Amino acid sequence: MIIILGAMDSEIDEFLSRLEDRQEIHWNGFTQHHGQLEGQEVLVSKSGVGKVMSSMVTQHLIERWQPQAVIFTGLAGSLRPHIEIGDTLLACDLVQHDLESVALNLPRGQVPFSDYRFMPAHPVLLELAAGFQPANGRLHQGRICTGDQFITYREMNSHAYLTEELEGDGVEMEGASVALVCSVNRVPFLVARTISDRADEDAATNFEACLPQASRNSLDLVCYLLREMAQVDLSEN
Ligand code: ADE
């Protein structure tokens, strides 16, 4: 069983039309969709927006289904000129950019009193996904910074830490929290995002406009990954 998550309904809708033997499960106001995709048993769910909602849903689903892997898809803002709107960004690792305990002498993103800061994706999932050829745009690997803010005006000094201190390539609102929950539970995960904006003053408009194309791209990527995953045993890595 593989869990496929997106933050919003519009980020998972495209999957639902392709699910075979689909059954709905209702949990605390969330509708989760169980079925078959590319011959694999999957559970597709909205995670909700932000770190708290996505952590809560991920922990619940891991306990309920004990999945082989969690794949998170959806949209992200680009932090780099060469990563363009419509491109795909695979997270090599993820960090919570708004977790800040400098007063405790800890670097930004460090979960205090733990070893968690940059959480790496499962190497085999990353390698498999790296073979995906998007219908539009280019494929990149990089660091995703996650926080409970929709970032605009990132070129202001107040956001310089995203690229300078954290060396981030993309920004979004759920990836690192899902990564942390998966890491603690020792469940392989991958976060794959379509770039919707440049985290600048046009971000909100670009985000809305990009949703339909991003959803199709996420479906193509996840279907590709599921076919590739059928050939490997993740527990060996
Ligand atoms: N997801 C897509 N674009 C984003 C942005 N600019 N900030 C946070 N999350 C996003």
Image (cartoon, grey):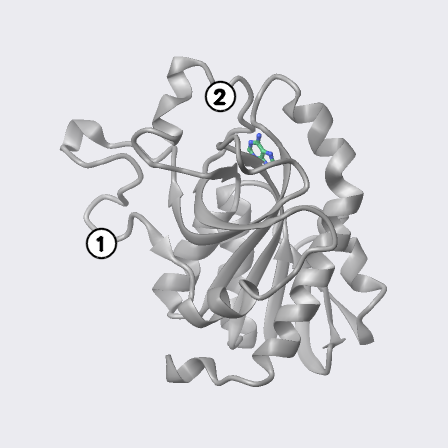
Judge from the rendering whether residue 192 lies leftward or rightward of residue 180; answer left or right: right
Judge from the rendering whether residue 3 lies leftward or rightward of residue 155; answer left or right: right
Q: Position of residue 87 (x, y in %)?
A: 63, 44
Q: Note whether residue 142 is visible.
A: yes
Q: CA distance from mark 2 to mark 1?
A: 28 Å
Find residue 115 and name its label: 1
Inspect the image, locate mark 2, and give the three-letter code of the amino acid beneath it: Arg
Q: Position of residue 51 (x, y in %)?
A: 49, 43
Residue drawn at x 66%, y 60% is: 133
For this orientation, the residue located farthest to the right is 17
Q: Give 123 or 49, whichever is nearer the viewer.
A: 123
Q: Which residue is mark 2?
A: 154
Q: Residues within 10 Å of mark 2 (few under 14, many from 20)?
A: some
SS at mark 1?
loop
Q: Is mark 2 within 8 Å of ligand 1?
A: yes
Counting residues from the N terminus, which is met first, the one under dot 2 or under dot 1?
A: 1
Residue drawn at x 46%, y 39% is: 169
Residue 146, relative to residue 152: is it above or below?
below
Q: Looking at the figure, which quarter contains the N terminus?
A: bottom right
Q: Position of residue 135 (x, y in %)?
A: 74, 54
Q: Answer with the quadrant where ligand 1 appears in the image.
A: top right
For this orientation, the residue located farthest to the top is 156
SS at mark 2?
loop
Q: Residues within 10 Å of mark 1 (few under 14, many from 20)?
A: few
Residue 74, relative to residue 18: is it above or below?
above
Q: What is the quadrant of residue 104 in the picture?
A: top left
Inspect the image, locate mark 1, and give the three-letter code of the amino acid beneath it: Asp
Q: Position of residue 81 (x, y in %)?
A: 52, 30
